[in-house]
Amino acid sequence: MLNANVICHIWQKKAIVLIKSVYIFTYILFVVFTCLFNTSCLSRIPSNERCNFSSAFSEPERCFGGIGDRCKGVPIIAPMYFNEYNCTVSGYMSIGSMLHDKCCIRTLNTGYKCAFPDEKTSKCREEWDKAVRDSLCSVFSAKRQWVVTFGPYPIDNEGDCSADCATLSLRAPSGAAVDLADQIYCENGCIKSKNGEVISHEDFCGTYCICQ
């Protein structure tokens, strides 16, 4: 007969396989949502005589650094909310979404999952994968994204970048959880202990720290 330790080990293996399967399934859902719903989100962006939230590529960059295509967001995972009174947009941002948006600007929107990607390009692929991972981690309560307010965007606004968007300073706010390797994107680094060492934590997606 199997002893308790062997049984426990078997169930642990099954649990790991189940978690990985759920992770892969969620990744597939994320890609499907991104591909199928991003363009339809445009119809839900409000317009009035006071605000201009347009995400058209002929328009200036808006919601720059946010998760999703400009101010469209990603349904369920990272939706955008529009305030038609003060012309602001409340949405989500992550280290990956920041990096991918900047990469698209640097490559003139010819990178992977940018506006006009080159065929079979690998440009911006690493940043895209990072953005996807950050959002998937957040789905599993390993928060790697945070709420941010974009705008305001009055009717005659010129978007988020007065100059080159690629040089725009984007930082994770105080209290945001970031991968340990991403602490350089915190405004003042991560929270440290009394002896000056970064306080690290572990969750489903690995080692992280909290921006101070």
Image (spheres, rainbow, N blue to C red):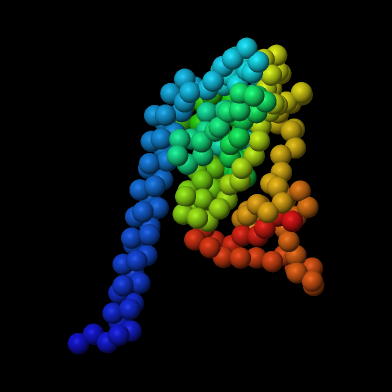
Q: Quadrant of residue 198?
A: bottom right
> Residue 38 vs residue 163: left or right?
left
Query: In this rendering, would 31 be left or right of 168?
Result: left
The image quadrant of residue 33 is top left
Location of residue 14 in the rendering, given as x and y in whole percent from the top left corner: 31, 67
Q: Residue at x 50, y 55 (%)?
A: 141
Residue at the extreme top: 49
Can see residue 103?
Answer: no
Residue 106 x/y as whole percent: 66, 29
Q: Residue at x 34, y 62 (%)?
A: 17
Residue extending farthest to the left is 1
At 78% from the left and 52% from the top, the residue drawn is: 188
Quadrant of residue 40 within the rendered picture? top left
Q: Quadrant of the C terminus?
A: bottom right
112, 61: nearer the viewer:
61
Front residue of 157 and 100: 157
**Image position, residue 46 (x, y; %):** 54, 20
- Please name the residue shown 63% across and 18% down the image: 52
Residue 180 vertical placement versus 71 (above, below): below
